[in-house]
Amino acid sequence: MPSPTQTFGYAQEMVAEDHLIRAGYHIIERNWRAAGAEIDRVAWDGEILCFVEVRARSRRDYGRPEETVGRAKQRHVVRAATAFLMAFAPGALPMVRFDVVSVQPTPDGEWAVSLFKDAFDAGH
């Protein structure tokens, strides 16, 4: 049985995914794991392959979710993205981008979703 934190995280990933789809992304993988790391969503945005990290907060007073994607998390995502590319694009590599989707509550009980394209790069 998933913990409340896992249940919250899954729900927020789905909110983020809906936002990505409305923004024109084509989701090809969810929670892809390799190299001891996970990528929340892998998606095409036009001809750019995007590795998307979803960050959420249950309360606004904890700070903005996107602020929690530090260097260590970036390294994990880049490591998993490298493994993904080696597994699925061993020839000519597509253009890639690392995006972050932030999900947090609004005062009226809705969810505010922000998309940060090109939030970080493989060189950190």
Image (cartoon, rainbow, N blue to C red):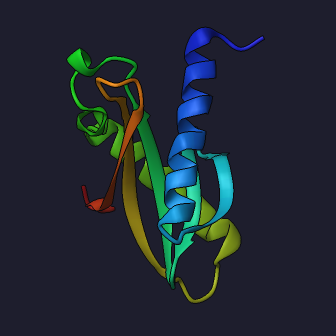
Residue 37 visible? The answer is no
Q: Is residue 109 left or right of residue 29?
A: left
The answer to which image quadrant residue 115 occupies is bottom left
Outermost residue, front side: 108
Q: Is residue 56 left or right of residue 45?
A: left
Q: Is residue 28 left or right of residue 112?
A: right
Q: Residue at x 45, y 47 (%)?
A: 53
Q: Is residue 19 left or right of residue 75?
A: right
Q: Residue at x 55, y 15 (%)?
A: 5
Residue 5 visible? The answer is yes
User: Quick check: 111 above or below 25?
Assistant: above
User: Quick check: 16 above or below 57?
Assistant: below
User: Quick check: 10 above or below 42?
Assistant: above
User: Quick check: 54 above or below 94?
Assistant: above
Outermost residue, bottom side: 92
The answer to which image quadrant residue 119 occupies is bottom left
Most foreground residue, 90 or 99: 99
The x and y percentages for residue 35 are: 59, 45
Which quadrant does the N terminus fall into? top right
Which quadrant does the C terminus fall into? bottom left
Most foreground residue, 27 or 23: 23
The x and y percentages for residue 96 are: 44, 73
The answer to which image quadrant residue 28 occupies is bottom right
The x and y percentages for residue 42 are: 58, 60
The x and y percentages for residue 23 are: 47, 66
Give the number of callouts. Answer: 0
Most foreground residue, 17 or 124: 17
